[in-house]
Amino acid sequence: MTVDEASAHSPAPTELAARLDRLPWNGLHTTILTALGAGWLFDSFEVQLFGSAVGPLGEHFNASVFQQNAVLAVWLTGILLGALAGGHLADRFGRRRMFVLTLLWYAGFTALTGFSPTLDFVYGFRFLAALGVGAEYAVVNTAIAELMPCRVRGKAGAVVMNFWSAGAILAGLLAYLLLDALALNDAVAWRYLFVIGGLTALVVLVFRRRIPESPRWLASQGRYEEAETIVARMEARSGLAPGGPNPGRRGDAEHAPAARVSRRSAGTCGAAAPPPWPACPRFGARPG
């Protein structure tokens, strides 16, 4: 089969996008949402750890207030740079690969912070961990835009963001356990906070491995057969035939066959999708 013949048998990017957007909610969506939320939870957990550890850490290294605040400044700088780089890396290497790499990166350097022999090592490890957390921000938001049906993206994003509060609560409970309930010595308490925090974050890998690659990204790389396989599997999880219409909501433009969704009806719902993916139809738009 020639390249032209293979292309002729490949699903159009616009068709794959429309099929993703008309999917009813299914178990795979729940798994994806849980995995993204769990990652966000441990991002928060990681951020809140510093607030609990800075006091014991500062006393252990006899650090001044300026030096303690400098750790936070280094951390925030790392998050900024990581967020800027994360989107570019996800575009180049894929969303699924970055899900795993960012998690391993910041979990590893968070745990290594607990073994820092000097304050300079704390600066370095916190900066490196922050790069992973910043990149995670970009990848999570991209995943919501590309894997969730457009009609529920706002709700899905809100659910994921709410995991942040849970992470802060867990970090506070761990700090209470180590610093108050067990009353560990300051010289070791802050180390346990970072080591336990880093190792616990690896639990998210159990969920992350079940997230499929973004069909939108695969299609943007010309890997249409892989994209079709993933979309067909998601349709099967919803009880739909591959490429078939959604029987659950008749008359809704976003569930019409892909060929009937006009570009004239494009709205802001799909603005996050990269070209050549069409935006979701405006509310009330009619098929062209």
Image (spheres, rainbow, N blue to C red):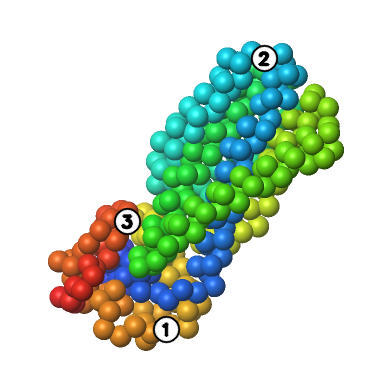
Q: What is the number of the mark on residue 150?
A: none
Amino acid type at image mark 2: Ala
Q: Residue furthest front?
A: 180
Give the residue drawn at x 56%, y 53%: 163
Q: Is residue 193 left or right of residue 12?
A: right
> CA separation, marks 1 and 3?
24 Å
Horizontal and vertical percent for residue 277? 28, 60
> CA separation, marks 1 and 2?
63 Å
Marks 1,2: beta carbons within 8 A = no
Amino acid type at image mark 1: Ala
Of label 1 and label 3, which has the lower sequence position?
Answer: 1
Horizontal and vertical percent for residue 288? 15, 75
Horizontal and vertical percent for residue 189? 78, 31
Of label 2 and label 3, which has the lower sequence position?
Answer: 2
**Secondary structure found at label 2:** loop
Q: What is the number of the mark on residue 273?
A: 3
Q: What is the number of the mark on residue 63?
A: 2
**Secondary structure found at label 3:** loop
Marks 2,3: beta carbons within 8 A = no
Q: Residues within 10 Å of mark 2 (few under 14, many from 20)?
A: some
Amino acid type at image mark 3: Ala
Q: Is residue 282 left or right of residue 151?
A: left
Residue 33 against residue 196 in the figure, above or below:
below
Give the residue drawn at x 57%, y 21%: 69
Quadrant showing the N terminus: bottom left
The residue carrying mark 1 is 241
